Image (cartoon, rainbow, N blue to C red):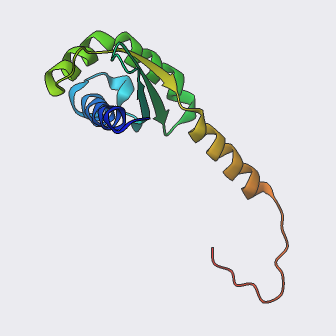
Amino acid sequence: MNTRMERANSEIQKVLMDIVQNKMNDPRLNKIVSITEVSTTPDFKYCKAKVSVLDLNDVLSVTKVLQKSEGFIKRELAKAVDMPQVPKISFVVDKSTENVMRVEEILRTLNIPKQEGEDDWQ
């Protein structure tokens, strides 16, 4: 990916985070929501934003709320960022957070005996 697209994606990600955290008043978004990655097409027509939520049970409802608020989010994005055109934003669930939490849970359930000389660092 070229530097121009990386800068654009980074700026869009920052602005989307600001919009979600500070400008949206939906009570369903009172959870810890983050935009983990943004990928925009080179012609700026489409943008995919990966959404991560601390509570995995709420991730689908949060994604639906964001998708239904796309018009508001696009208007706010247009005010904040100078772009050739404001892309259509598609919010998708970021599976990496879910995978990390699943691995951590598996590691917690393992019963690994300590070897001699190991310190208890936890």
Report whether 94 appears left or right of 102. left
Report whether 32 appears left or right of 14. right
Q: Nearer the viewer, residue 81 or 117?
A: 81
Q: Residue at x 28, y 34 (%)?
A: 21
Image: 38 above or below 78: below
The N terminus lies in quadrant: top left
Residue 77: image quadrant is top left
Residue 76: image quadrant is top left
Image: 106 above or below 62: below
Q: Residue at x 31, y 34 (%)?
A: 4
Numbered circles on residues, count: 0
In the rendered image, residue 97, in percent from the top left (x then y), is placed at 57, 40
In the rendered image, residue 81, in percent from the top left (x then y), is placed at 19, 27
The C terminus lies in quadrant: bottom right
Report whether 51 appears left or right of 71. right
Q: Nearer the viewer, residue 10 or 25?
A: 10
Q: Residue at x 67, y 52 (%)?
A: 104
Residue furthest to the front: 2
Residue 70: image quadrant is top left
Residue furthest to the bottom: 117
Image: 106 above or below 110: above
In the rendered image, residue 61, in percent from the top left (x then y), is placed at 49, 20
Q: Nearer the viewer, residue 103 or 56?
A: 103
In the rendered image, residue 53, in percent from the top left (x then y), is placed at 48, 35
